Amino acid sequence: FVIRLTPARKYGFDVNIEGSQNLGGLFAGSNLVGLNFNLQNRNFARRAIQATYSLGVATELNSTVTQTTQLSGAYSLLFPRLVWPASWKPLPVFWPRQPRPFRTSLRSSLGASARYIHRFDYLDLLAVNASWGYDASRTDGDRTRTASTRLFNVEFVSVNRMKILNDLIKTNKSYEYIFNDGLILSTIFSNSWVRATEKRTRVLRAGLETSGFLIGSFFRTPFLDTTLKRFVKGDASYSVNLATGPKSTLAFRFLGGLGVSYPGSNTSRRQMPFYRSYFAGGANSMRGWGLRKLGPGSAIKSFALDSFPERFGDIQLETNVEYRFRVATVAGVFINSALFVDAGNIWLLRKNDAYPNGEFPIRDPGRLWQDLAIDVGTGLRVDFGFIKFRLDYAFKAKDPSPDDPAAQNKFFYNWKPLAGTLQLGVDYPF
């Protein structure tokens, strides 16, 4: 046989156009249009290092005024080996002796990014991030293990709140959990184990992040006391896909997570940072609810703008079961469907007067069933091979945290065929 290799171009450049429409939430009735410019150097410093430069600009507007302006930039280096930033020299790697051959991939990554958002009459937000870490993967027969470590991860968010947002905070203090300054100095570990055979695929994922432990313990300043986020967060998921026929599979997933914030002088820091909190709902979670519209626990809150529309928690438990099957093949495109059930919720670790019954029922395990949310639904999936589009339609079978107290935990309360939630996604939810 003959193998022909064609060298890739050293530089790659592309421009992406993005658009979205927001029909609800705090910033309702708006459309976002943006441009992203990306430049890639596949042989930076003539050492097979991939350098990527990105620049983005976007504007969000309604029918009358420009609501939001966004500017972003990012830079990253991907080394095809393990290196240490102090010397940029390769690190030695030792693998234990194995009875059979295996393939490995070792990489080092350095990245930095910044984003500026101006929301008319609401806020100015600046977010800066930098990280250094390593990625490794190993394939041995039908088993693949991937490990990722971010030894140094720095994230800083500065929020300048304006009049309208300050007025909203006076109406509902819960908005302070989202719109506040924050500094994260963390180390992140994540691992995945995949075993795939002809009839069964099993995936186990686990992650751990800790922030502010050392610096927060040995250095006490007013800035760190009010800004540094001190927490530890761990989560894991396990999923299995079983082939039940030539054109059908049964898939299920279980996931759980826990985040614990360290005590500090700032009472708002007794909650996990909003951008590290758990949430339920959306295209890949509890599909009977919109994104961040479930929980915590059995707390009953309104989705009105003068209340608190976003739901977040320190604990998450969820399980999903899905039966997938082929419907038809049209011009080489697979048309698939599915029947699914989702069950789970999020909880707060500590009692919060703003969310009655929102804390995890450690001392009252019998309340766990009361807090459990359940949805059922079906979906349509269009499989082009290189990409899958998914349209899921789900009904709330049991809602522990509705905005109407009369609907709490009533099975299929006030059920109507068009009262479900439509979710649009890419690829399978798990």
Image (tube, rainbow, N blue to C red):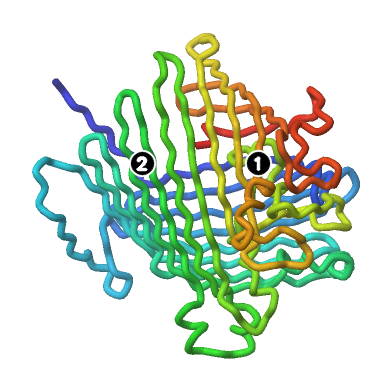
Reading the image, the residue beneath label 2 is: 9
Viewer-side residue, 51 vs 398? 398
Q: Identify the amino acid type marked 1.
A: Gly
Tag 1 near tag 2, CB within 8 Å: no
Judge whether residue 115 can be spotted in this image.
no
The label number, if any, that marks residue 398 in the structure image:
none
Which residue is depicted at the point 79% across and 44% down?
408
Instruction: Name the spot of residue 257 as percent of width and height, x first.
Output: 52, 55
Residue 163 lies, in percent from the top left, at: 88, 69
Q: CA distance from mark 1 to mark 2?
A: 39 Å
Foreground pick, 140 / 357: 357
Element marked by disc 1? loop
Residue 148 left/right relative to 90: right
Q: Is residue 238 above or below residue 422?
A: below
Question: Image quarter for residue 170?
Answer: bottom right
Seen at 84% across and 44% down, the residue is 29
